[in-house]
Amino acid sequence: MKDILLKKDLIAYLIHEIERVKKTTPQESELHNYSFVQGHKEGQLKALYDVLNYVNGINTKYSAKHSRLR
């Protein structure tokens, strides 16, 4: 039961982080002292999606179609 709750919390956190990264603007990055590079943002999303898929037992790799950056 505890494992199920931890997995549920982890999935919720990953989804929250994916949404946060998608919404990050260059101005916010400068405010937090991050170097804002489009490739860096894509790399973050790739890593988050890969972990989310792994946690969900999905063996697919991230692809750019999962993330339409706006």
Image (cartoon, rainbow, N blue to C red):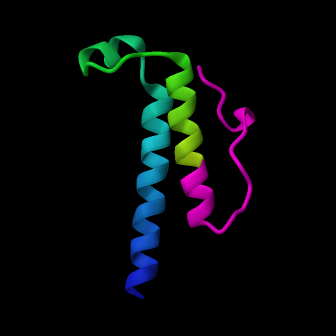
- Locate residue 42, reporting x and y percent: 57, 29
- Locate residue 28, reporting x and y percent: 32, 18
- Verify whether residue 54 appears in magenta: yes
Q: Is residue 20 above or below residue 47?
A: above
- The answer to whether residue 36 is left or right of residue 66 is left
Q: Start and end of the magenta stretch?
A: 50-70
- The answer to whether residue 24 is left or right of residue 62 is left
- The answer to whether residue 37 is left or right of residue 58 is left
Q: Residue at x 54, y 18 (%)?
A: 38
Q: Is residue 57 above or below residue 47?
A: below
- Locate residue 32, reporting x and y percent: 25, 22
* Quarter of image, res 13: bottom left
- The answer to whether residue 60 is left or right of residue 53 is right
Q: Residue at x 74, y 34 (%)?
A: 65
Q: Quadrant of the N terminus?
A: bottom left
- Locate residue 59, reporting x and y percent: 72, 61
Q: Residue at x 59, y 19 (%)?
A: 70
